[in-house]
Structures are given as structure tokens and as C-alpha cells.
Image (cartoon, grey):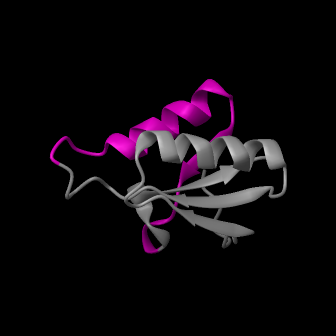
Amino acid sequence: MTNKYAQIPETIIDLHGYTMREAEEVLHTLIHERKYAHVRIITGKGNRSAHGPVLAQFVRDYLNARQIRYNNAKLHEGGEGALEVFLK
């Protein structure tokens, strides 16, 4: 069951155009600063990438490896191209 109420992130991080290494640095800092409980991370859908959504899958794998809870953003907030990440 999904939450019908709006989930408003404390901050939004847009990773469009980042390399996987750059994205990893941002994620590492975000997690270790412990500044936010709810963050929206925009990865994009990979529609313009020759190899598909590489960055989106990288971010999901990174979060999964650290057992960090997330879900896709609602369609009007980015859908598959954005993640709602819960750090606390």
C-alpha cells in the first residue's frame, strides 16, 4: 500500500550528468553527514544514454548495499527517474 499523502523531502539532489564516481561521492557525503532524514535523488531515466539508465541502477545498488530504504518518487515528482530516500 502506498502513502497517499505528499512526502516532502528536506532536500533534492539532482545527479543528472554526474559520473558514477561523482554520484558515489555525493551519496557517501549525504549518508555520512546525517543531515537529512528524507531526500529526493533525481537520477533521470537514462532515456538519452546509449546504454540505458546506468546511473539510476548504480544509485539503487549503492543504497541496497547499505540497506537504506527508498522508493520511486511519485509520477509527478519524477517517477522512475527519482528516488525518495529515507536516511533516518
Front-lying residue, 22 or 85: 22
Front-lying residue, 46 or 72: 46
Q: Residue at x 19, y 41 (%)?
A: 51
Name of the residue lying farthest toward the top: 65
Q: Residue at x 22, y 57 (%)?
A: 47
The picture places residue 23, in percent across and down from the top left corner, at 51, 47
Is residue 60 positioned above or below 10 on the image?
above
The picture places residue 77, in percent across and down from the top left corner, at 49, 71
Q: Which residues are magenta?
A: 50-76
Quarter of the image where one finds residue 83: bottom right
The picture places residue 40, in percent across and down from the top left corner, at 60, 61
Per the image, is 80 magenta? Answer: no
Q: Residue at x 52, y 60 (%)?
A: 73
Front-lying residue, 61 or 14: 14
Is residue 44 positioned above or below 77 on the image?
above
Left or right of 23, for residue 80: left
Name of the residue lying farthest toward the left: 50
Left or right of 70, for residue 37: right
Per the image, is 74 magenta? Answer: yes
Is residue 78 positioned above or below 54 on the image?
below
Left or right of 63, for residue 10: right
Is residue 66 positioned above or below 19 on the image?
above
Residue 81 visible in the snapshot: yes
Residue 88 visible in the snapshot: no
Q: Residue at x 42, y 53 (%)?
A: 18
The picture places residue 54, in percent across and down from the top left corner, at 33, 41
- Number of numbered callouts drawn: 0
